[in-house]
Image: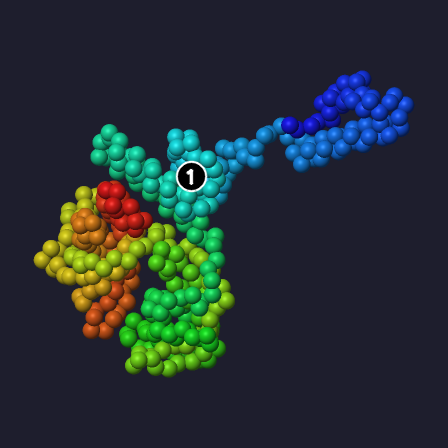
Amino acid sequence: MVYTLPNLISTLKPLQQNNPFSEFGGNDPRATIIMVVFIGVLVLVGVTSAILNGGSKSSGPEVRFSGRRFRREAKRIGLDRERTKLMLHLVKRYNTKVPMRLLRHAGYLDSFIHQALEDVRSADLSDTVREQRVYEIFQLKRIITNSIEASGVARSSKSLRIGSQLAVGIGNHWYETELLTSVAAHLGIAAPESDKGEQVRLGKGAPVKVKSVSDQGHVYQFASRVLGYGVHRKTPVMYIDHAQKMKKVQNRRYQRRELDAPVYLYPVSVVTTGKGKKAKRSAVVNKEQRRLGRMIDLSAGGCAVQSRMPLAADGLVRVDFQTEDRTMITVYGKVLRLERAGYQGGVMRIKFTRVSREHVNRIQSFVYGYEDEE
């Protein structure tokens, strides 16, 4: 029972009229003292209780959900009005106890997305409507996850695993490399090479930036400096300083996942027919020029493919491949850049330009680990 001062006073009135200590005698000073002490204790308990409860009539610690606050936070992290409306609809449907946690905790959000996907996939909908709704749910997942990941900070560079794929930034250029050694004093990375296969060498103390991607697709970056050069197991090495903290950044719009799978590559040409205002441009897939490659990683926005016969940068390409659940996928894209790899050809960084709604959903199911639910 919460004691307020008016209620406490009213409970004391009968006590004054019918003195429970009358057995000590009407004029006994000891009885009067005991009664005053008892009343004082009750008053103290009531006042203390009122202070601890802050004058609130609430009987529990739960804070009432504020839709306005949720909308404000959703807007801050990048959700537009329609996607915020969808989130609130799902929150109400699933009777989510702490909706704000969905915007801040990846694990809580993941369970929520799982449930939404299961409901949509089991609903009696046309294929077109179903794929559109699945796509919108994945958009919620992508935007909120990117916000959560961008707000974190990782441990020092000593937490990087040997064999981790890295990118080292020198000036305005980034070079793909690999972590070969890591000791208390420094890191040893494969010495970066230019597009012509020439080793990039810097003076001792020269500043560099380093990016790494975790197994979950999180991108980390830290600043370092060159300590020197050497050789590790016949491989040229650049030694750089450790960093106490690696900042989590979100330069990638889409989360990626490693995928070791064969792919077919088809060069695509743009052909113009007709003249003047009647001229039309169309893409033609050159199937007779098919070549093989190997998928390295995959996201809803692009992929990395290694091939001994790579296409040059800015080339258009069709890519056919299968994910681990044997789903056949076809995408069209543009080679953003080509990283030469000697006799092994090179690695193409491909940005998708056209993907069907069904296939982009299959890709996101794979990337986020939901492929078993298809």
- Residue 359 occupies quadrant: top left
Secondary structure category for the residue under label 1: loop
Res 233 visible? yes
Q: Nearer the viewer, residue 88 or 184?
A: 184
Where's the N terminus, which quadrant?
top right
Category of crowding for the residue at label 1, using alpha-carbon neighbours closer than 10 angstroms: few (below 14), some (14–19), many (at least 20) = few
Q: Residue at x 41, y 55 (%)?
A: 250
Res 311 visible? no
Q: Which colouring convention does the figure follow?
A: rainbow
Residue 64: percent from left, percent from top? 54, 32
Residue 146: percent from left, percent from top? 41, 50
Q: Is residue 196 left or right of residue 172?
A: left
Residue beneath disc 1 = 80
Q: Residue at x 37, y 42 (%)?
A: 111
Residue 287: percent from left, percent from top? 11, 55
Q: Nearer the viewer, residue 273 or 62?
A: 62
Q: Residue at x 59, y 30 (%)?
A: 59
The extreme left residue here reads: 288
- Residue 162 occupies quadrant: bottom left
Residue 218: percent from left, percent from top? 39, 56
Q: Amino acid at mark 1?
A: Asp
Q: Is residue 346 above or below residue 252?
A: below
